[in-house]
Amino acid sequence: MQKLPAILLIGSLSMLFAEIFSGASQAWFISGWGLLLTFPLYLFHVLFFLNIAFKLKRITPPQLYLLGVIFGLYESWITKVLWSGYFDSNGPGLGTILGIGVSEFPVLVFFWHPVMSFIVPVLVFELLTRKIHISHASILTKTTRKTALIVISIVSLSAFIANGNKFNLLSSNISLVVTLVIILVFYSLSRRADLGVFNFGRRGFIALSLYLALLYILGFLFLLPERIPNTLAPYATIIVFYLLPILLFKKSKTTDMELIAADESRYSIRDLCIFTIITIVATNLATIFSKISSVVLTVSYLILEFVGIILFIYVVYKILNNIKS
């Protein structure tokens, strides 16, 4: 009884942090595109990579990050954003290097999808169910500095939500609040679940793999086919960035798959409620003060480019150190 609500919960969390926080999706819950494509895309990616993490016993934050990098590469084959820029643009914002967008790649592949689409939903799921993986205990420990960083991030990302909803108060609130209500409903039905519900058997994993394979093939062929590159470099670069995290992930050490109870030193459900209130208030303010939000959005996006690159280098360094020790 707990499995399906838990699955829908983590899918909804991924939609919240990946799509709502970026402003990419608005009322996805009443949209055929959102329900039939966007939500399954995030849900099945999260389930697929969590299954790999469980089966190979590699679920530390750096290892999840590497899987998240692979996750983010769907923005080439399916959406073609890494090759041709965002949907509402005439091409990559700062041009291309080796066939990939200079500004899009670091944000989407090195930060947004590893962190917002994958790691954060997993961590929040653990906090909601109060059962956390032992290797996640440190990152979920509450500190003043960490809390300040979370609040600053929420305020900055509220500009993305406001911009994606074209600074419309009704649209911004419906997109955010209804998604939060959906999460609350699924949470109420899956309180006793833990990460173990995502460790599927052989048939389940095959089904996930087949669905994603079909999604990639159909997305590549039929979604904006005019954006398909006609040179070798864009494909070669993407393949290299598949091989690098796969190699590092494979070489990294296995870990105990032990889940522990979240004690008082970790972030609590009360903390999550406070962050939720801050998000709603910040989003409304960002929507009202559109000129300020536009500046915050631009600056934040530029910062995320550097954060993504630094984060990728840091994780590679951590993994290599772990391999050597």
Image (cartoon, helix red, strand yellow):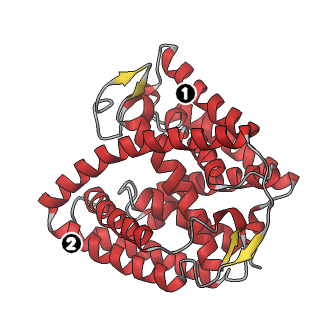
Residue that label 2 marks: 285
In the displayed structure image, the side of residue 252 where residue 157 appears, left or right: left
Quarter containing the C terminus: top right
Q: What residue type is disc 2 on?
A: Leu
Vertical order, 154 against 324 (above or below): below
Vertical order, 160 against 267 (above or below): above
Q: What residue type is disc 1 on?
A: Ile
Q: Counting other residues with Cα less than 10 Å from the Cα at mark 1, is it few (<14), some (14-19), or many (20 or more)?
A: many
Residue 222: image tag: none
Q: Nearer the viewer, residue 22 or 212?
A: 22
Q: Which residue corresponds to the image point at 75% horizontal and 38% vertical from the top-left?
A: 250
- Where does the image place residue 115, in percent across and percent down from the top left? 51, 54
- Determine if residue 103 is in view: yes
Residue 238: image tag: 1
Q: Quadrant of residue 92?
A: top left
Element type at marker 1? Answer: helix
Q: Identify the residue at the far right of this view.
A: 202
Q: Nearer the viewer, residue 122 or 57?
A: 57
For marks 2 and 1 on the same chain, the one whose residue lies earlier in the sequence = 1
- Determine if residue 32 is in view: no
Would you say the residues marked 2 and 1 are in contact, meaning their CB atoms lie under 8 Å apart? Answer: no
Q: Counting other residues with Cα less than 10 Å from the Cα at mark 2, is it few (<14), some (14-19), or many (20 or more)?
A: some
- Where does the image place residue 144, in percent across and percent down from the top left? 42, 74
